[in-house]
Image (tube, rainbow, N blue to C red):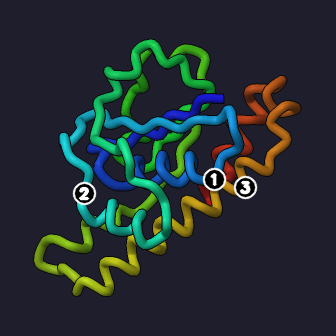
Amino acid sequence: MKILFLCTHNSCRSILSEALFNHIAPKGWTAYSAGSFPSGEVNPLTLEALVRAGVSTAGLRSKSSDEFEHLEPDIVITVCDKAAGEACPLYLGRAVRAHWGLNDPSELARGDTALDADQVAAAFDECMAIIRQRINTMLALPLEVLALNRDQLQAALNGIGEL
């Protein structure tokens, strides 16, 4: 089972999702992440949050969705509002697509309303807790049954995005 998490910049939420999924998922399940307009670097606060949670950061990097032209994922999940409205590349083929919108904790570290370091770290940890809950809920689905009905699987995955 191959899962592709998409976001606009592939520097925060999709990276967190990829790393957490691969940390939790059973053998034979693999997550990847990419961006429609990748930033080219993983947000350092993302890496710090993963380290705090005891999740490996090895091999994480900001990637373009073009890099996965031949991946043929089973499931594609967008994790930010910007990516949800974008057209998925045609090569994603028959992948079941769902949206798990997440607020971007990295936005809290910049701009006129920037929070202090502890508040920003707490926002990253909260985002990871939501992702972890959603992944655990997804992994608890009877996927072998739902895989027979794409509409049911898509509805279930989209429902998880409301958690």
Mark in front: 3 vs 2: 2
Task: Give me the C-alpha separation between circle 3 and circle 1.
Answer: 11 Å
Specify whether residue 60 is in view: yes
Q: Residue at x 73, y 48 (%)?
A: 139
Q: Nearer the viewer, residue 19 or 84?
A: 19
Q: Going from the N terminus, do you reach mark 3 or mark 1 first?
A: 1
Could you tell me which secondary element the residue under label 2 belongs to?
loop
Q: Residue at x 33, y 67 (%)?
A: 48
User: Which kind of residue does numbered mark 2 sit on?
Assistant: Asn
Q: Residue at x 49, y 18 (%)?
A: 71
Q: Residue at x 33, y 60 (%)?
A: 47
Q: Going from the N terminus, do you reach mark 3 or mark 2 first?
A: 2
Mark in front: 3 vs 1: 1
Q: Residue at label 2? A: 43
Q: Going from the N terminus, do you reach mark 2 or mark 1 first?
A: 1
Q: Nearer the viewer, residue 73 or 110?
A: 73
Q: Residue at label 3? A: 137
Task: State which quarter of the image contains the N terminus.
Answer: top right
Specify whether residue 97 is in view: no
Q: Residue at label 1? A: 24
Lateral position of residue 83 relative to residue 64, left or right: right
Task: Give me the C-alpha separation between circle 3 and circle 2.
Answer: 27 Å
Relative to 111, residue 62 above or below: above
Could you tell me which secondary element the residue under label 3 belongs to?
helix
Percent position (x, y) of residue 31?
53, 38
Percent position (x, y) of residue 122?
40, 80
Percent position (x, y) of residue 128?
49, 65
Lateral position of residue 16 relative to residue 23, left or right: left
Q: Quadrant of residue 147?
A: top right
User: Which kind of residue does numbered mark 1 sit on?
Assistant: Ile
User: Which kind of residue does numbered mark 3 sit on?
Assistant: Thr
